[in-house]
Amino acid sequence: MKRKVPKNLKSSDVRGMVKVRKKIKVHKGGKVVEANALFDTGSRGSYFSKSFAEKIGYEPYEKPREVPLAVKGKHAKVVGRTAVYLEVEGEILPEEELIGVIEDLLVDVVIGLNVMEKYGIYIEDDEIKFRPHPPTSMII
């Protein structure tokens, strides 16, 4: 059964993947920068656009690395990385996260399963929720 999504909604549900756009804050070295984030259950990793990463600073790679996209034969160039704290729905996540930097990414930030699963972040009715709340990280 296909779910109808009104055009004015900011999320989509395609083949079990759920995406929703929300504003988050990124903390690094005393700076706090607001970003437009796409929470994407179809992405295993989390990434910043190069233009956003330039605002907060990042460590460029000597040679870009390619990651496959969900389109046959297409790849994105990972050009560096940076370690930051993420603030989601007013909650600063407890651990510093290493985020890849992608050239020509269309949104400031993609939050993938590596962060969502770690902190129990899920999407319900186009809203970001935590299980448990407040978010914690656990070693099991």
Image: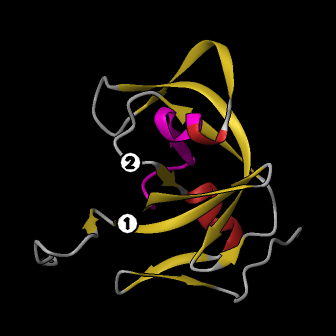
Residue 132 on image: x %, y %: 70, 87
Task: Looking at the picture, tell me which residue is in the foreground, 4 or 47.
Answer: 47
Task: Looking at the picture, tell me which residue is in the foreground, 71 or 125.
Answer: 125
Residue that label 2 marks = 107
- The verdict on residue 43 being magenta is yes
Relative to 77, is 100 above or below?
below
Marks 1 and 2 in Cβ contact (< 8 Å): yes
Task: Looking at the picture, tell me which residue is in the foreground, 80 or 33.
Answer: 33
- 63 sits to left or right of 136: left
How far is the residue under mark 1 from the one under mark 2? 9 Å
Magenta residues (range): 40-54
Mark 2, secondary structure of its residue: loop
Identify which residue is drawn at 46% across, 67% down.
23
Disc 2 marks a residue whose amino acid type is Val
Mark 1, secondary structure of its residue: strand
- 34 sits to left or right of 21: right
